[in-house]
């Protein structure tokens, strides 16, 4: 049974790739529900299916079978422009490699999703400043990626993910290319966003990073092997209080 109060619902999801005459079963009947405001990490070995799941959740790939509802809407019934619009408006992406355009300033990179969404110039300027200020980079708006540190580049990527006020943020190894100090700073930003109500699903191979989230999904052989939710006091050390 599917319910409307979950931002993500997938039921018996499968994904099969054909490699020549060989079928590769990347997802094998995965079911998952994510409530609004959850902060979830996904862990698993290479080839476990976690990246395939993220691609499906981000509407970058379609499942072979099963149901995927995003904020109550059946993604399989969206096509062409409707799917692209839903992806741009409802999902904010943060990638390990930042995916910033090197010739554009931080502000111009953050503006891109709004340009695709048809947002007016005045609104784009206001939202861009607000998003960069939220991640502490309002003084680096005119800097290009090669003038920024790795941590600052990831902050720009997070700001870009926020500007269309998405329903969910999908982060694929967001600390993977960062030193531990920068990685912890990025996680602090994610925790602050989550405390403000953002729903975040993150892939990571670092257990120290995963432990900073409220729920950890462990993937193995295309299935969820373990789904563990932990009380906030275990994460932050303070009963029921977020940082």
Image (cartoon, rainbow, N blue to C red):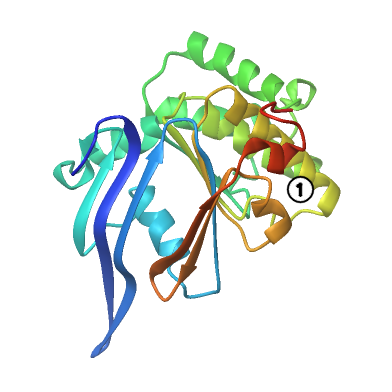
* Front residue of 102 and 179: 179
Give coordinates of residue 39: x percent, y percent. Answer: 54, 40
Total labels drawn: 1
Q: Characterize the local packing of mark 1: few (<14), some (14-19) or many (20 or more) Cα atoms within 10 angstroms.
A: some
Seen in the picture, residue 192 relative to 231 is either above or below; the reply is above
Q: Is residue 200 visible?
A: yes
Callout 1 secondary element:
helix
| In the image, farthest residue toward the left | 77
* Front residue of 224 and 168: 224
11 sits to left or right of 177: left
Query: Residue 145 falls in which quadrant of the image?
Result: top right
Q: Is residue 108 visible?
A: no
| In the image, farthest residue toward the right | 181
Seen in the picture, residue 189 relative to 221 is either above or below; the reply is above
Give coordinates of residue 226: x percent, y percent. Answer: 48, 63
Instruction: Tell me the quarter of the image containing the C terminus.
Output: top right
* Front residue of 154 and 68: 68
213 sits to left or right of 30: right
Give coordinates of residue 202: x percent, y percent. Answer: 55, 49
| In the image, farthest residue toward the top | 122
The residue at which mark 1 appears reads as 183
Give coordinates of residue 161: x percent, y percent. Answer: 53, 34
Query: Residue 236 falls in which quadrant of the image?
Result: top right
14 sits to left or right of 91: left
* Front residue of 146 and 50: 50
Instruction: Tell me the quarter of the image containing the N terminus.
Output: top left
| In the image, farthest residue toward the bottom | 21
**Rendered residue at 28%/67% (across/down):** 15
**Rendered residue at 26%/66% (across/down):** 14
**Rendered residue at 82%/53% (across/down):** 180
């Amino acid at each position: 049974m599917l319910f409307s109060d979950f931002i993500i619902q997938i039921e018996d999801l499968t994904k099969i790739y054909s490699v020549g005459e060989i079928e590769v079963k990347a997802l094998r009947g995965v079911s998952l529900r994510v409530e609004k405001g959850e902060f979830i990490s996904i862990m698993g070995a290479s080839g476990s299916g976690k990246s395939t799941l993220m691609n499906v959740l981000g509407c970058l790939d379609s499942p072979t079978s099963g149901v995927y509802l995003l904020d109550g809407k059946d993604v399989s019934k969206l096509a062409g422009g409707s799917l692209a619009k839903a992806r741009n408006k409802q999902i904010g992406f943060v990638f390990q490699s930042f995916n910033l355009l090197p010739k554009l300033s931080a502000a111009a990179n953050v503006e891109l999703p709004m340009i695709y969404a048809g947002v007016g110039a005045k609104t784009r300027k206001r939202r861009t400043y607000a998003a960069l200020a939220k991640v502490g980079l309002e003084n680096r708006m005119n800097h290009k990626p090669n003038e920024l540190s790795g941590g600052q580049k990831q902050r720009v990527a997070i700001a870009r993910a926020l500007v269309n006020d998405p329903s969910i943020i999908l982060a694929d190894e967001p600390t993977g290319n960062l030193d531990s100090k920068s990685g912890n700073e990025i996680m602090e930003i994610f925790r602050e966003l989550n405390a403000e109500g953002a729903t975040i699903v993150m892939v990571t191979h670092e257990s120290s990073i995963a432990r900073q989230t409220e729920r950890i999904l462990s993937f193995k052989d295309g299935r969820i092997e373990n789904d563990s939710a932990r009380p906030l006091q275990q994460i932050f050390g303070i009963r029921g209080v977020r940082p």
